[in-house]
Amino acid sequence: MAYGQGKLGEAHALLEPVLSANASAELTTLAVELEQRFEALERFLEHYRDQGEPGHAERALLSLALAAAGNRTWHDRANLSAADTLFTTQLMGEAEVEKKLDALLKPTLKSKPKKGLDKKLRDFAEDEASGTKVGARAARLAAAVARALGGL
């Protein structure tokens, strides 16, 4: 149940008393799977942070904190990831910039990109979002939209 609720540390803590040199293959595999899942959550957080997606990074950080509870080593690793995320990316400031990017992209959720969206995204990346990871993401999106509009 703990695993299904995202509480990987609690699930691992329940396994620890029965893990030993002669533990069943099933229990050993489950312990490895828990570690791999926690590492995947760390990678998700790093990916979102590095790609200029602070909203997703914040949600990944919350999932990571939930997963770490009950396991001291994971808790320490989650705290380091939290510090990196909150302070090096200036999550709150970039989250505001991301909201503006989302507003630019919102019309594309219902229909294909309109002509000129690539320019709007480039202008946004160079102006309001300049120097941020969200700005770099907007520039990548502008290039992708330009390619897509060129092929339509």
Image (cartoon, rainbow, N blue to C red):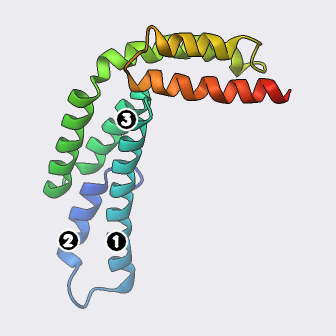
Residue 14 location, quadrant: bottom left
Q: CA distance from mark 1 to mark 3?
A: 26 Å
Classify mark 1: helix, strand or loop: helix
Left of 137 or right of it: where is 84? left
Instruction: Name the residue tied to disc 3.
Output: 49
Q: CA distance from mark 2 to mark 1?
A: 12 Å
Q: CA distance from mark 3 to mark 2?
A: 32 Å
Mark 1 or 3, nearer chain start: 1
Mark 3, Cα crowd under 10 Å, few <14 / some 14-19 / many 20+, is many
Left of 99 or right of it: where is 7? left
| Pick the front one: 142 or 70 | 142
Instruction: Name the residue tied to disc 1.
Output: 32
Across and down, in percent, residue 115 comes to 77, 12
What amino acid does circle 3 point to? Arg
Instruction: Name the residue tied to disc 2.
Output: 16
Residue 145 location, quadrant: top right
